[in-house]
Amino acid sequence: MTAERLRWGILATGGIAAAFTADLIDLPDAEVVAVASRTEASANTFAERFGIERAYGDWASLAEDTDIDVVYVATPHSAHREAAGLCLDAGRNVLCEKAFTLNAPEAEELVALARGRGSFLMEAMWMYCNPLVRRLKELVDDGAIGEVRSVQADFGLAGHLLPEARNGMLPPTHRLRDPGQGGGSLLDLGVYPVSFAQLLLGEPTDVAARAVLSEEGVDLQTGALLGFGGGAIASVHCSIVGGTATSASVTGSKGRIDVPYGFFFPDRFVLHRDGRDPEEFAAAPADGPRNSLKHEAREVMRALRAGETESPLVPLDGTLAVMRTLDAIRDRIGVRYPGEAVTPA
């Protein structure tokens, strides 16, 4: 690692990998030096697009590249355990996309591996690194709305409007409907509402859930009610069959906070305190939605330069707690993925 620039490797070449790489290139203290895919053609195309020096047609070559300070794992979550584990085994630091893994046991394996080797590992939960979300949490923690009574959050998209849709529905082979790729709305979209609730309330003590499943056995939409110690409740919803408000609200004993569309990368939120006029908090121009992925990249680089093996903004214990909740929801709705060694708890 150099004092001037931190060297990144990109593992996978899909849409989120491209978006993150574009933001990395825009950061003066980051350098993307290598990319890997399962095929040389895909890696080469990606490398040419972003001017990356080295392109590998296999993951192992990237993992073994000692000229890399940290690897960003951007595969579908069904491959996170394999890809991130390969990099950690080779001594690389890792930023791994969410959902962190398919289930909590896989997540525990990665965390144990990272901690055993003293390597940095972080879930790419960019929402937690967003300055406006951090400000919202500070207000809640400081008692701006009193004791939190409830949290509501939703994230749904109209799958039939995506370019890949056929006859008004995503095809069964699409990753969002493919059980082999961890398909369904919960792990892809529901991780955001669940993570938002747990950012403010911690891990739930009780989980209830209902879902509509596809013919392939993945959840097309899921609603869950989470109970917490002290009597707080969170209502979370996700869907790949209908676009939702994608908003959030936190209600306390003395007021509430409303976050409009895009709660996980907000440009503003409104604080309502009993007996006072509403206050709007807006993102600074440099912190707006278009720069959202940069915040997590900066946090990774800050932590690595400080010699930290995990981020206080996205702690590994918090990631594990979210994965346990996702497992519990899947247990309630009857979703299990091929090859899972254990039944979700």
Image (cartoon, rainbow, N blue to C red):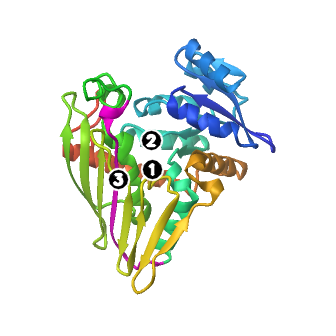
Residue hosting label 3: 245
**Horizontally, is 161 left or right of 265 in the view?**
left
19 vs 223, nearest the viewer:
19
Q: Amino acid at mark 3?
A: Ala
As helix, strand or loop, the secondary structure at mark 1 comes to helix
Mark found first going from the N terminus, 2 or 1? 2
Q: Amino acid at mark 2?
A: Phe
Asked if disc 2 and disc 3 are in contact, CB closer than 8 Å, the reply is: no
Q: Residue at x 30, y 32 (%)?
A: 160
Up the image or down, 18 lies above or below 120; here it is: above
The magenta-colored residue range is: 143-162
x, y percent for residue 300: 63, 47
**Which is more foreground, mark 2 or mark 3?**
3
Measure the C-alpha gap from mark 2 to mark 1.
Answer: 7 Å
**Horizontally, is 50 left or right of 248 in the view?**
right
Residue hosting label 2: 100
Residue hosting label 1: 319
Asked if disc 1 and disc 3 are in contact, CB closer than 8 Å, the reply is: no
Asked if disc 2 and disc 1 are in contact, CB closer than 8 Å, the reply is: yes
